[in-house]
Image (cartoon, helix red, strand yellow):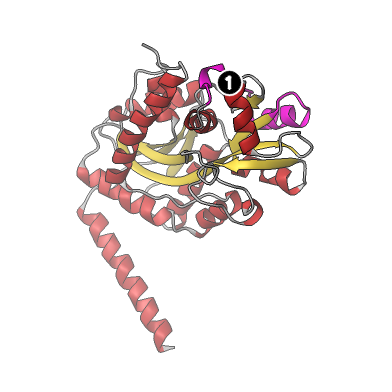
Amino acid sequence: MVKVACAGALAVTLAVTAAAVTAQGWKPERPMEIIIGTSAGGALDRSGRLLLRAMQESKLSGQPVAVINKPGGSGVVGLIYLSQHAGDGHYAMVTGQSLLTNHIMGRSKLNYTDFTPLAILVAEYVALSVRADAPIKSAKELIERLRKEPTAFSVAVGTGVGSATHASFAHAMHAAGVDVKKLRQVTFGSGGESMTALLGGHVDAISSPVSSIVEQLRTGRIRIIAVSAPRRLTGDLADVPTWTELGVNSAVDVWRGLAGPKNLNASQIEFWDSVTSRAVKDREWTKELARSLADNAYKGSAETFNHWQAEYAEMRTLYTALGLVKR
């Protein structure tokens, strides 16, 4: 009983302290918006709604918060909307690699430097899968064949050229010494369409986030031959090698993070740091990570900027090799 009482007193003390810190800095004065650059139902949307839930359940904002979907242009429509609210901490957008790659490929004039980095929330990994009865037995076999004949296999790489799943597969093949400009990479309208094409024999392999194909693995319809994680995953993927284990210097994650409008001040950034650092400890957030075999890759504002900067340079080198950089 004494321990419980002490724990309760400590929790109250921490809550009061956190409230005092927030009171001394910036706090929302009107309803807030979490912008999603895709339609409802995808990974970015799920992250945004989990963030919304955590903010509401823990009363982190003190104001109403809404998720606003602004699909189009691989996230460009949402970014344009966010850019129209410079200096306003009431807006934030859940985003991913497209924040960097859209500018690299010339799809958008907006670069990561046109926004305020707020957080990286989660990192998910990409699997390379084949049908259960496919003649390809291992990723090593696929690499050896593609080194000799880059057009030997067709691979579904996501919903668009330059997507995160495309980048993951291309990065591994580039690191393995394959001529990536000659690869037969096919895009579809959704991950479901890509899986249908794989199971129907229309493509030889599929590069996709682990969470979107793990159920097909459990039914025995596919085999995962490699994963982009920096270390072995657990559970259903415990026997799947990483690219690094196979001698390929490639570990690419699909991160989801939070960007704010340009010119947020230090107090506004501190507010969002407080919100995101607490949201990623939410019970439902943790359950979603376990379900999708994703990692809590939380980074605050300063670390997020460093990550964006380093990854932009790395992706520009890769996309140049792929012939996707607009001169």
Question: Which residue lies most toward the bottom here?
Answer: 2
Visible residue check, residue 28: no
Residue 110 placement (x, y as % from top left): 34, 22
Point out the image quarter for the N terminus: bottom left
* Label 1: few (<14), some (14–19) or many (≥20) C-alpha neighbours in 10 Å: some
Is 190 magenta? The answer is yes
Image location of residue 145, percent across then percent down: 64, 27
Above or below, 119 relative to 278 = above
**Secondary structure at numbered mark 1:** loop
Whether 20 is drawn above or below 74: the answer is: below
Write down the region rendered in magenta: 178-204
Instruction: Say if the magenta span includes residue 200.
Output: yes
Residue at x-position 71% and y-position 39%: 137
User: Which residue, as the protein is rendered here, is positioned at the far top?
Assistant: 327
Q: Would you name the residue on which mark 1 appears?
A: 183
Let me know if residue 241 appears in the view.
Answer: yes
Image coords of residue 299 (percent x, y): 35, 48
